[in-house]
Image (tube, helix red, strand yellow):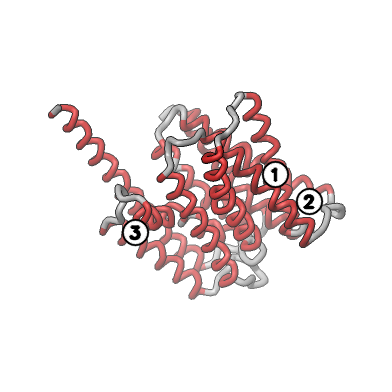
Amino acid sequence: MHPKLWLAMFIAAVGWASGGIATRAAFNEGVGGWTMIAMRALIAAVLVGAVMLAKRIPRPSRAVVMFGVVQAVFNLTVPYIMFTFAYDEASVGFVALFAALIPMATAIYAHFMLHEEPLSVGKLLALFVSFAGVAFLLLSGDSGLSDGGRPVLAAGLALAGVASIGYAGAFAKRNAGEYHPLMITGLQFGIASVALVIAMFVIEGAPSDVTATGWWLIMVMAVAATFMPFLIYFWLLERISATEASLIGYMVPLIALVGGLLLLDEQLQTGIIVGGALVFAGLVLADQQSRRASRSAAEVRRLGRFGG
């Protein structure tokens, strides 16, 4: 792979990882959770909408709008809420380990929603290893924070977010090819931002008391951690395979962990080290199974064409 592609993947990973760091910093600055979520989604929606206008994306059909509603709820609104408040209860590295389980959650949903993606014995073993890491992390009581935090609550919130994104991923795969990715992304942000802004006004009121630093951190969440990685990811998909692009998922938790240690004075505790190692071991096993299955499927298709 060309070095500039690796650089693009690294920049996207840094962007996504910066979201958790900026979120914890914004909580420390006194910014309300609902304000962060709503303003992040709204700013990102405006930026994505500008890209859609520039590319002259056509108006979506009613069926595509309905699909966008599902994705707006499960792929954006619920995860944003759950992960944002999880960062208020545990370190960036702690929450990032749960975010790394998203491919696993997608595989579980795909087993029931997609006939062509059953869970193999190898994937089940990978699931067992990763969730053993989660169990160890919770039993250790470590949260990565010096004041203790509330790791069980953080884990519950993060796992709810993971489950939501996993369903959205499997749902998207089931409907693959029926929509323009940029159109769906715009619909997600547009629909979610409306709902989240209303929730913000009801729960926390207008964001009139946010400091300049708080607004800067919200801009980091919206631009560096949301809009910019999204653009890079689509740019990468035009040049490399989805499997190669998925390597970004391995970088994000590691960058988030290091960033939390360096920028937020978080702690690298035993539970996070051992639990994280088991989670990543499971991810590697699952990735190997997926790549092996993809190669086998490609070989079957090749032989089929040869036989025809």
- Mark 3 and mark 1 lie on one chain; the one further toward the N terminus is 3
Image check: 293 left or right of 133?
A: left
Disc 1 from disc 2: Cα separation: 10 Å
Question: Residue 237 appears at what percent x and percent y?
Answer: 46, 32
Residue type beneath disc 1: Val
User: What residue do we see at 79% from left, 47% from top?
Assistant: 215
Residue type beneath disc 3: Ala
> Which residue corresponds to mark 2?
214
Image check: 80 left or right of 206?
A: left
- The local secondary structure at tag 1 comes to helix
Q: Residues within 10 Å of mark 2 (few under 14, many from 20)?
A: many
Question: Residue 147 appears at what percent x and percent y?
Answer: 67, 71
User: What residue do we see at 52% from left, 52% from top?
Assistant: 253
Residue 209 in the image: above or below residue 300: below
- Mark 1 and mark 2 lie on one chain; the one further toward the N terminus is 2
Image check: 193 left or right of 270?
A: right
Towards the viewer: 180 or 39: 180
**Disc on res. 126:** 3
- Can you say which quadrant of the picture contains the N terminus? top left
Residue 231 appears in the rendering: yes
Disc 3 from disc 1: Cα separation: 34 Å
- The local secondary structure at tag 2 comes to helix
Q: Residues within 10 Å of mark 3 (few under 14, many from 20)?
A: many
Towards the viewer: 122 or 80: 80
Which residue is at the far right? 208
**Disc on res. 220:** 1
Question: Residue 304 appears at what percent x and percent y?
Answer: 17, 32
Disc 2 from disc 3: Cα separation: 40 Å
Towards the viewer: 283 or 260: 283
- Can you say which quadrant of the picture contains the C terminus? top left
**Disc on res. 95:** none
User: What residue do we see at 56% from left, 60% from top?
Assistant: 95
